[in-house]
């Protein structure tokens, strides 16, 4: 069974001979107070190419001392402000109150924001985090993920070239325990925004509570249901269910990782899902036409293979895939399990890889109960042509995003975040601003009001 079907992947050869991109890595230091500097300890750590496991850069490894330097720079920049807000649309209100008072609210920046991002979308997560923080005139210390430190350094260098005042946005590369934790525990950081695993999110809340009660927003894991109703357009549903799971090698917090299909269309759906997976082009992402590259690192790669073994051992039907692709790099075959039961590990845990699990259901009440029977509540897909069904499901599902007959629609205006253990707070758009604002009530007596 293992290794079966490798020849299906047309770009298999390109995995063995990776393309050498003409990218020059210009920045590998920390970016503190508008300047590139080495880590205080002088230490560096390697960035690996997931296609080969080879080192592509050595990057300065920040620790608690560097976090202190960056927080001081951010505090200084904040205190020396104000620097201009990016949008004129952030403002308070004038409120009616009992008595002879003029009452207004001021929307003020929170102060120094600590931000910790993951490796699965290093640039998107950077944008989602710094956007609202800077729009609300906060200053920032951002810690990148240890697997992907380079893009944030590069883009921040462009912002400084464009005139960002020193200290407003500091970027520290480093590991979770030695750089992330000191940021979360720092007494002079006013807020933490985090995207990553639920486990680390819980630790972050604890660190915030034990230090200065800084406010925390969290965007965490998921096990999002993708519900295919009996009246759905099955071709479209199969294609979008494929995209919902396999996009970005399955490394998405909101991956549609429990495909729940009505029993009347189940067999047809499984065949179509298999057809989509068999056409997926796996290979070197620098190669034109490739749809699926390697997983981010050895740890994730091994974790996914372990879940695949667990799926087989627990009795699910392996329809396609099930093994690595090639003999080097972290490539995994697009994999599908059918006849998956709710109590199997592959139906409960966040696999974070190209492994689709297809489950069968009988009626809407049952699917709502099962879709909600998880600690997570990030997103859901609903596939139906019946308006009443769409309205019923969109209200019954305990998740932060419901995509109806679409998936992964991520316009900047649309809020994103989780119910339950998928997080707290919303990112993007107007709702994200509240994470970065203090509301001050200002009350002034009215001595001789013309009216009240
Ligand atoms: P992680 O949550 O440990 O790492 C994400 C970020 O948190 C990184 O920048 C890391 O350095 C930092 N971090 C780790 N420990 C920390 C600590 N004690 N204090 C402060 N910061 C800390 O996730 P990891 O280990 O990379 O992946 C494990 C699993 O988490 C994945 O297999 C996946 O299931 C899930 N995950 C979910 C993501 C999402 O988008 N919601 C993103 C990345 C991972
Ligand atoms: Mg971790």
Image (spheres, rainbow, N blue to C red):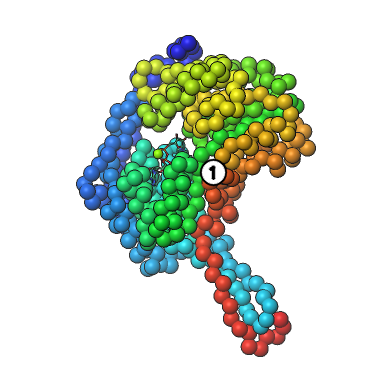
Residue 256 percent location from the top left of the image = 58, 32
Please name the residue that numbered disc 1 is placed on. 421
Observer-nearest residue: 419 or 344? 344
Q: How many marks?
A: 1
Q: Residue at x 62, y 79 (%)?
A: 102
Q: In the picture, which quadrant includes the C terminus?
A: bottom right
Name above or below for residue 252 compared with residue 426.
above
Residue 211 percent location from the top left of the image = 39, 58
Observer-nearest residue: 189 or 206? 206
Q: Residue at x 40, y 64 (%)?
A: 78
Ligand 1 image position (quadrant): top left
Q: Residue at x 74, y 29 (%)?
A: 363
Q: Residue at x 57, y 24 (%)?
A: 357
Specify the farthest residue to the bottom. 448
Label 1 element class: helix
Name above or below for residue 426 compared with residue 77.
above
């Amino acid at each position: 069974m293992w290794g079966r079907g490798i020849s299906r992947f047309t770009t298999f050869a390109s995995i063995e001979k990776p393309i050498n991109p003409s990218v020059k890595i210009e920045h590998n230091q920390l970016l503190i107070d508008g300047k590139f500097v080495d880590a205080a300890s002088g230490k560096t750590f390697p960035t690996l190419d997931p296609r080969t496991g080879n080192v592509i850069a050595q990057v300065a490894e920040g620790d608690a001392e560097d976090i202190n330097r960056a927080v001081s720079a951010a505090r200084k920049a904040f205190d020396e402000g104000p620097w201009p807000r990016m949008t004129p649309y952030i403002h308070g209100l004038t409120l009616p109150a009992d008595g002879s008072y003029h009452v207004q609210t001021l929307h003020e920046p929170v102060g120094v924001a600590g931000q910790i991002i993951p490796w699965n979308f290093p640039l998107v997560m950077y944008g989602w985090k710094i956007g609202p923080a800077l729009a609300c005139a906060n200053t920032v210390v951002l810690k990148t993920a240890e697997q992907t430190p380079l893009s944030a350094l590069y883009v921040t260098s462009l912002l400084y070239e464009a005139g960002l005042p020193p200290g407003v946005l500091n970027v520290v590369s480093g590991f979770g325990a030695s750089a992330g934790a000191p940021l979360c525990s720092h007494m002079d950081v006013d807020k933490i925004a985090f995207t990553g695993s639920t486990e680390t999110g819980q630790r972050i809340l604890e660190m915030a509570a034990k230090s200065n009660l800084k406010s925390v927003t969290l965007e965490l894991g998921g096990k999002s249901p993708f519900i295919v109703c009996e009246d759905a357009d099955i071709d479209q549903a199969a294609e979008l269910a494929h995209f919902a799971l396999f996009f970005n090698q399955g490394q998405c917090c909101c991956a549609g990782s429990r495909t729940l299909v009505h029993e009347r269309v189940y067999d047809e759906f499984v065949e179509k899902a298999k057809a989509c997976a068999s056409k997926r082009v796996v290979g070197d992402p620098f190669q034109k036409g490739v749809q699926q590259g390697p997983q981010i690192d050895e740890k994730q790669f091994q974790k996914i293979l372990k879940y695949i073994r667990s799926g087989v051992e627990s009795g699910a039907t392996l329809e396609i895939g099930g093994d690595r692709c090639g003999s080097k790099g972290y490539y995994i075959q697009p994999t599908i399990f059918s006849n998956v039961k709710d109590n199997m590990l592959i139906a409960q845990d966040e696999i974070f890889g190209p492994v689709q699990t297809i489950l069968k259901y009988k009626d809407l009440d049952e699917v709502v109960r099962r879709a909600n029977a998880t600690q997570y509540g990030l997103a859901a897909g609903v596939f139906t042509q019946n308006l009443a069904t769409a309205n019923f499901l969109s209200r019954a599902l305990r998740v932060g995003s419901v995509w109806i007959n679409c998936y992964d629609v991520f316009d900047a205006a649309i809020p994103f975040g989780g119910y339950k253990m998928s997080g707290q707070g919303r990112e993007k758009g107007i709702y994200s601003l509240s994470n970065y604002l203090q509301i001050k009530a200002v009350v002034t007596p009215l001595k001789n009001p013309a009216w009240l």
